[in-house]
């Protein structure tokens, strides 16, 4: 049976649409279903109702010209491989790749095989790119977001705050008396505790919230729209209930040990607490230390 790929084509020249479809006809291995539009708004709607396997866009349509077209398309299609069609202009194609397209084709040189190869290549390239960028932004032990990802997300929520006054909270979470656990049971058991805590944080988390490992035994959350002291208080109480528990861990000698864990949590709200993101982190950190048990 032939596999099937859906291609969306942004193109305002009906002859080019006809030729494009012709190029993908009668393939023995793959059935290409091509849907075309000449409008960015329409393309956005099409993607909302069904995500295609690949997007092919002509940079020059009546509504938008040049690289601006790619920038506009990328706003609503970040996870879709994009192939750009240009006239006889390699330099423009290379700029398009720098702006996030996976490949480009010169309209004058397209053949059935070069187009099909570009479609496969664009798909594989996006998968590889996504895997690589995950490696760069994930903590290897817990698979949570790392500090680099935290910095990036913080920039995003801060820019929403500056522009639209959307408040957000930062929460710092630290495991209490973690060092003695490492000292008594070894680092591997400590690692498993960190993984359990990370897993619980992920499980009981809304998709829009950011969960990361800040470093060592410290975790960080960014919660958009958590904008009042009452809400923050309830949120922290809820996290405490989820995380404070006895964790059953298998040691290297295959013994099962039950390790009681408690966490300290501190939060701060942008717009109420800190004057800038740095200050917010520092206040959340101080509040977390205030929450620490005395001995
Ligand atoms: N197993 C393991 N331990 C780690 C890792 N990263 C940091 N640590 C350990 O985490 C411990 C953190 O120690 P402290 O900051 O003193 O924290 P604590 O013992 O929980 O003390 P309080 O926070 O005051 O309760 C240190 O012993 C670090 O070696 C890791 O990836 N794996």
Image (cartoon, helix red, strand yellow):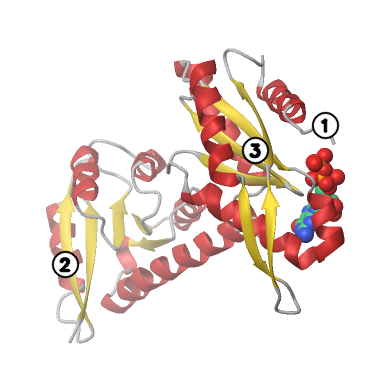
Query: Which mark's residue is nearer the viewer, 2 or 1?
Result: 1
- State the residue in front, 89 or 295: 295
| Residue at mark 2 to residue at mark 1: CA–CA distance | 66 Å
Query: Which mark's residue is nearer the viewer, 3 or 2?
Result: 3
The residue beneath circle 2 is 33
In the image, the residue with mark 3 has its CB under 8 Å from the nearest atom of ligand 1: no
| Residue at mark 3 to residue at mark 2: CA–CA distance | 41 Å
Query: Which mark's residue is nearer the viewer, 3 or 1?
Result: 1
- Numbered mark located on residue 151 in the image: 3
Residue 238 at what x, y percent from top left?
Answer: 51, 35
Residue 61 at what x, y percent from top left?
Answer: 25, 43
| Residue at mark 3 to residue at mark 1: CA–CA distance | 31 Å
The residue beneath circle 1 is 294
At x 30%, y 69%, the residue is 110
- The earlier-in-sequence mark between 2 and 1 is 2
Q: Is residue 159 visible?
A: no
């Amino acid at each position: 049976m032939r596999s099937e790929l859906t291609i969306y084509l942004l193109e305002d020249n009906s002859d080019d649409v006809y030729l494009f479809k012709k190029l993908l006809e009668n393939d023995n291995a793959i059935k290409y279903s091509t849907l075309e539009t000449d409008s960015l708004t329409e393309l956005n709607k099409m993607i909302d109702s069904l995500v295609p396997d690949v997007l092919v866009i002509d940079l020059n349509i009546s509504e938008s010209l040049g690289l601006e077209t790619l920038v506009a398309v990328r706003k609503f299609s970040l996870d879709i491989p994009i192939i750009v069609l240009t006239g006889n202009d390699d330099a423009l194609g290379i700029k398009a790749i720098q702006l996030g397209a996976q490949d480009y084709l010169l309209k004058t040189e397209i053949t059935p095989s070069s187009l099909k190869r570009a479609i496969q290549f664009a798909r594989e390239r996006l998968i590889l790119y996504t895997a690589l960028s995950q490696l760069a932004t994930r903590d290897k032990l817990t698979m949570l977001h790392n500090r680099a990802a935290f910095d990036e997300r913080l920039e995003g929520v801060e820019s929403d705050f500056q522009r639209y006054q959307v408040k957000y909270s930062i929460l710092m979470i630290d495991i209490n008396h973690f060092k003695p656990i490492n000292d008594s049971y070894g680092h591997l058991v400590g690692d498993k505790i960190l993984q359990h805590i990370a897993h619980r944080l992920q499980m009981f988390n809304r998709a829009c919230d950011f969960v990361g490992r800040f470093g060592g035994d410290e975790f960080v959350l960014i919660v958009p729209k958590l904008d009042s002291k009452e809400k923050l208080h309830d949120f922290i109480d809820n996290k405490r209930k989820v995380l404070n528990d006895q964790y059953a861990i298998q040691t290297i000698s295959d013994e099962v040990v039950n390790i009681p864990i408690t966490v300290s949590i501190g939060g701060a709200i942008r717009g109420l607490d800190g004057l800038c993101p740095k200050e917010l982190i520092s206040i959340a950190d101080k509040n977390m230390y205030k929450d620490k048990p005395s001995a």
